[in-house]
């Protein structure tokens, strides 16, 4: 994929919640309203070696995203999602994780002519559809005419079907899906302590960043290298922490 002709634009898929939108904080606030102040806790204390793809089975087509970072019982997760689904235009109420990040990405997309699609598994809520709410949210944050795809199933199969070059996500399991089921590269936006990064992620060829700002810097470097003659492809792979082209990934 890195051998594209010079000047061909990158096709990038961005996850929404956890990358741009601060869903976790808002869900935690509503969980405390429902279950009391000490009900939800972040699950960072599981430790850096706790990630296993088997921990995240492929959901059914109707299931909402798992609340992996909140320690809630399945019963409470279901109750929380029912509560969220009753809130009018809930998805438009979220803050940005990094204020101004959406606007910075929009500027880079316009300047470099990237093709971008935003991927989300948001369930519906009262009011407009989750797709329309998400489009409005991005427009309000400074991204005109956003393409939003409400998805189910493997992010890798979605990346393959859409012909994406890069998928940016905040979940290791989604990045693993991208590597397993597509030729796209995965960029993990990891917002917890670096010491809690699952050890199993590092050798997989997933690029790891700690903010959208850092991710955008990486994408710009990849874009600049991809516009050069094919002999510079290995430089692109090095930016992603990958092995040489003549070595298996």
Image (cartoon, rainbow, N blue to C red):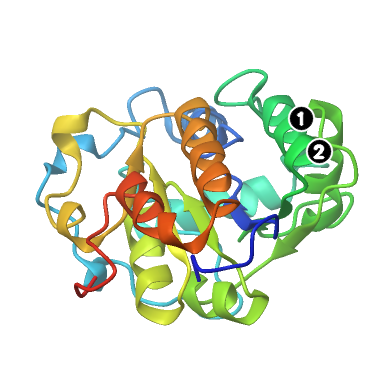
Q: How many marks?
A: 2
Observer-nearest of 18 and 217: 217
Q: Which mark is residue 60?
A: none
Where is residue 63 shown, x and y percent of the image?
55, 70
Q: Is residue 127 left or right of residue 220?
A: right
Observer-nearest of 16 and 245: 245
Q: Tell me the SS state at disc 1.
A: helix
Q: Is residue 32 left or right of residue 244?
A: right
Q: Residues within 10 Å of mark 1 (few under 14, many from 20)?
A: some
Q: Is the C-beta separation of discs 2 and 1 under 8 Å?
A: yes
Q: Residue at x 22, y 62 (%)?
A: 204
Observer-nearest of 195 and 238: 238
* 185 versus 225 height, above or below: below
* 108 versus 69 height, above or below: above
Where is residue 74 shown, x and y percent of the image?
37, 60
Q: Is residue 195 left or right of residue 61?
A: left
Query: What's the distance in space between the residues labelled 2 and 1, CA to CA?
Result: 5 Å
Q: Is residue 248 visible?
A: yes
Where is residue 47 shown, x and y percent of the image?
11, 41
Q: Residue furthest top?
A: 99
Q: Residue at x 23, y 27 (%)?
A: 193
Residue 42 falls in image quadrant: top left
Q: Quadrant of the C terminus?
A: bottom left
* 97 versus 64 height, above or below: above
Q: Is residue 122 visible?
A: no
Q: Residue at x 56, y 32 (%)?
A: 22
Residue bearing the label numbered 1:
107
Q: Residue at x 71, y 53 (%)?
A: 116
Observer-nearest of 154 and 213: 213
Where is residue 3 shown, x and y percent of the image?
51, 69
Residue bearing the label numbered 2:
110
């Amino acid at each position: 994929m890195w051998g594209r002709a010079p000047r061909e634009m990158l096709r990038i898929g961005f996850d929404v919640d956890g990358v741009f939108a601060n869903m976790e904080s808002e869900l935690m606030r509503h969980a405390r309203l429902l279950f009391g102040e000490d009900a939800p806790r972040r699950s960072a204390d599981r430790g850096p070696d706790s990630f296993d793809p088997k921990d995240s089975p492929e959901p059914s087509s109707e299931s909402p995203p798992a609340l992996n970072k909140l320690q809630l019982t399945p019963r409470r997760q279901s109750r929380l999602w029912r509560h969220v689904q009753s809130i009018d235009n809930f998805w438009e109420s979220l803050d940005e994780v990094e204020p101004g990040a959406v606007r910075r990405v929009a500027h880079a997309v316009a300047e470099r002519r990237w093709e971008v699609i935003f991927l989300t598994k948001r369930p519906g809520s009262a009011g407009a559809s989750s797709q329309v709410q998400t489009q409005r949210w991005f427009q309000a944050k400074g991204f005109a005419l956003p393409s939003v795809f409400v998805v189910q199933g493997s992010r890798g199969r979605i990346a393959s079907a859409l012909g994406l070059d890069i998928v940016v996500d905040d979940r290791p399991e989604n990045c693993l899906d991208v590597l397993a089921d597509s030729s796209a590269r995965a960029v993990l936006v990891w917002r917890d302590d670096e010491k809690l990064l699952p050890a199993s992620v590092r050798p997989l060829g997933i690029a790891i960043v700690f903010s959208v700002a850092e991710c955008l810097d990486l994408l710009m470097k990849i874009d600049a290298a991809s516009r050069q003659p094919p002999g510079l492809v290995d430089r692109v792979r090095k930016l992603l922490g990958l092995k040489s082209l003549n070595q298996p990934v």
